[in-house]
């Protein structure tokens, strides 16, 4: 199995790459940070290709170099992502653009580039898109981040419907991790224009998972073909609470509609 993992030099991406390699997969990792990429590729004994997923040309080059070397691609993990934690009023237009370019457009570029290749060269391929629990239940100070992660969840769900409808042999899944010990908090070092905001120290939490645990969860989910790849099952109640609020709004609208009809 030939797997490509973006954002593979650290955190969840590195852990997924390690887990896939340990399952006898051939892995190619990419990252925007050349130094971190070189270190990770050496530690994992895999091929590393520098790429910025916000640029479609970089993602196309990553796919081309992988195909030239191996002749096939079975799995892509569109994992590269960045974060900006701040109240909405402190977020600039550039902040939003940066998160959209990496977190959403990076996934779009990955799917658009790799899906046709996987359908053409793999007997049973899989596409993984990394979102977040913030893509299922938003939280304060994460408006830009949550917006991009909700978009990734929606993109993946719609893509799953499309692939199923046309009988594709390629599956798709979305990772919705909660708090994971990773380096996403340091992603502002790659922010256009340099580091302009202090990076908050990642707070310890009882639900904080080590990245290696998440890597194994994702690798196992790829083997099963899971659509939703859940790492923090204890967060179920927060998702249910959101759904209850949505359902209550529908029920209230239905009740108002009934009253309006009876008053005609």
Image: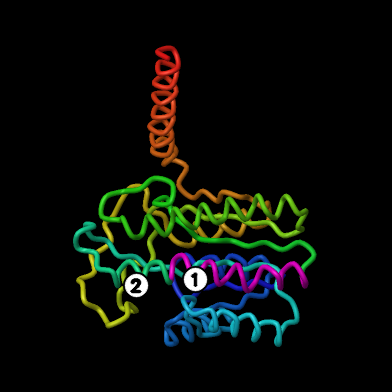
Observer-side mark, 2 or 1, equals 1
Q: Which residue is mark 1?
A: 106
Residue 238 lies within the magenta run? no
Residue 226 place in picture, x, y as percent: 63, 50
Q: Which mark is residue 187?
A: 2
- Residue range in magenta is 102-121
Position of residue 256 relative to residue 108, above or below, is: above
Earlier sequence position, callout 2 versus callout 1: 1
Residue 120 place in picture, x, y as percent: 77, 71
Residue 44 place in picture, x, y as percent: 55, 78
Colour treatment of the image? rainbow
Task: Determine whether the residue tagged by mark 1 lies in a helix, strand or loop.
Answer: helix
> Label 2, label 1: how many angstroms apart (C-alpha)?
15 Å
- Nearest the camera: 249 or 255? 255
Near mark 2 (Cα within 10 A), the count class, few <14, some 14-19 or many ≥20, is: some
Residue at 47% x, 82% y: name it.
37
Which residue, as the protein is rendered here, is positioned at the far right? 123
- Nearest the camera: 47 or 249? 249
Position of residue 166 relative to residue 197, above or below, is: above
Q: Quadrant of the N terminus?
A: bottom right
Q: Quadrant of the C terminus?
A: top left
Residue 234 shown left or right of residue 139 in the figure = right
């Amino acid at each position: 199995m030939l797997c490509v993992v973006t954002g593979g030099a650290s955190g969840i991406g590195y852990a997924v790459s390690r887990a896939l390699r340990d399952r006898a997969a051939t892995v190619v990792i990419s990252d925007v940070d050349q130094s971190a990429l070189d270190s990770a590729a050496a530690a994992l004994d895999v091929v590393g290709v520098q790429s910025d997923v916000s640029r479609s040309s970089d993602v196309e080059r990553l796919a081309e170099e992988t195909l030239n070397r191996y002749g096939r691609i079975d799995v892509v993990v569109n994992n590269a992502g960045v974060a900006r934690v701040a109240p909405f009023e402190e977020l600039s237009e550039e902040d939003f653009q940066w998160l959209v370019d990496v977190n959403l457009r990076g996934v779009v570029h990955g799917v658009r580039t790799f899906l046709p290749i996987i359908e053409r060269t793999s007997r049973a391929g899989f596409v993984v898109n990394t979102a977040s629990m913030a893509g299922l239940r938003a939280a304060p100070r994460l408006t830009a981040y949550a917006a991009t992660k909700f978009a990734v969840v929606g993109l993946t769900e719609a893509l799953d419907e499309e692939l199923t409808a046309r009988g594709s042999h390629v599956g798709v899944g979305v990772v919705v991790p909660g708090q994971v010990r990773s380096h996403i908090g340091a992603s502002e070092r790659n922010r256009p224009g340099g580091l302009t905001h202090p990076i908050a120290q990642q707070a310890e939490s009882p639900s904080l998972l080590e990245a290696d645990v998440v890597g194994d969860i994702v690798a196992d989910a790829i083997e099963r073909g899971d659509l939703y790849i859940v790492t923090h099952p204890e967060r179920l109640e927060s998702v249910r609470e959101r759904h209850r609020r949505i359902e209550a709004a529908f029920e209230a609208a239905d009740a108002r509609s009934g009253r309006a009809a009876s008053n005609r």
